[in-house]
Image: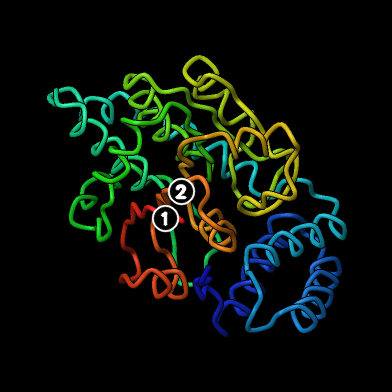
Amino acid sequence: MTLMVKVEPICAVCLLHRGYEEAELSTSDLGLRMRVMIELLKMVSERFSPNAVPAWLGAERDRLIRRITGCPDPYREAKRKSNEEALKLLPSVKNLLAPLKDPYERFRKACLIATAANAFEFGILGYSFQVADAGSLLTEAERSLVIDDTEQVFSILKDGKRVLYLLDNAGEVGFDLVLIEELKALGLEVRVVAKGFPILNDALLEDALFFGLDKVADELLTTENDEVGFTPEKVPSSLLDAYRSSHLIIAKGMGNYETLTEYPAKPPIVHLLKAKCGPIARSLGVPIGSLVVKLRKD
């Protein structure tokens, strides 16, 4: 398997930039912020390399910040606001599917909605997102979709039964709900995976429950860890079994893309994301800001 190169020199700057943002959110104590940055600089100098996976370093960074500041979830308030804004938009978003009768067209539109919602992100160098702007996400979505493998994905779903859906950020979970409902309408068994503990602004079980995913999905699971993305050897055996027995993995966001592309795509994986930084965009061969629905099969 040829691994996709996803790390560039700018990734070191981004790791530090987000680390400082999280330190600011975690504590008002300037002394603690200084300790965070000193320790973070040491960690980056020791661990950053041409073979590094930024998502894995990001998880180490966040554990370092929690240890020093004592703040368990610096993005908790941002996640709450994201969820509330997404919930307000859900009725109008669901109305976008109302005129569509063809199952594939409904599926494709739901994929586009879920992918556009990957804009819910904070702390990425050179990228900004305001919760108040969430309503405009779908305005440019169609023209921003640069890789569209929805037909191939739909073909897999026609022959398969079990889907594992890896959530990414809070807020966008509300838009994931739209796609998960469509998957269920196609007669599929859908298990949904949230993070086990706070990491970045990633969705936790409480965020999935906020949008009622427990009433739609066949099962809600968690990674039982605080890893960025999805690392198969670091999840509980029950989740790993669900992963291996699925006919398709739907992986939302850049963190899941960074980590899962370190492994073979067995079962097939479809990545739904917005390419919010240069290294990820270049690894995909798309402009920054592009929406991507990319299927990987090994």
Q: Position of residue 66 (x, y in %)?
A: 81, 55
Q: Nearer the viewer, residue 208 or 165?
A: 165
| Count of labels in the image | 2
Picture quadrant of residue 198: top right
In the image shown, does 221 or 139 lie closer to the viewer?
221
- The one nearer the camera, 267 or 181, is 267
- In the rendered image, the vertical position of residue 78 relative to residue 206, given as above or below: below
Report the side of 127 relative to 289 (left or right): right
The mark nearer the N terminus, 2 or 1, is 2
> Does residue 150 appear left or right of residue 229 in this picture?
left
Which kind of residue does numbered mark 2 sit on? Answer: Ile
In the figure, 119 relative to 211: above or below? below
Name the residue rendered at 33%, 48% in the picture.
116
Instruction: Identify the disc placed on residue 269.
Output: 2
Q: Callout 2: 10 Å neighbours few (<14), some, many (20+)?
A: many
| Residue furthest to the top | 215
Question: Residue at image x 41%, y 53%?
Answer: 273
Q: Where does label 1 land, which residue?
A: 296
User: In the rendered view, does 224 fall on the left or right side of 104?
Assistant: right
Q: Residue at x 52, y 34 (%)?
A: 246
Element carrying mark 2: strand
Near mark 1 (Cα within 10 A), the count class, few <14, some 14-19 or many ≥20, is: some
Whole-percent x, y for residue 251 in the image: 49, 46
Between the residue at mark 2 and the residue at mark 1, the CA separation in whole angstroms equals 5 Å
Hey, which quadrant is residue 107 in on the image? top left
Query: Mark 2 near mark 1, Cβ–Cβ under 8 Å?
Result: yes
Q: Under tag 1, what secondary structure? A: strand
Q: How is the image coloured?
A: rainbow
* Relative image position of residue 250 (x, y in whole percent): 46, 42
Mark number, residue 172: none
**Residue drawn at (33%, 25%) of the image:** 182
Picture coordinates of residue 129 (x, y %)?
A: 43, 56
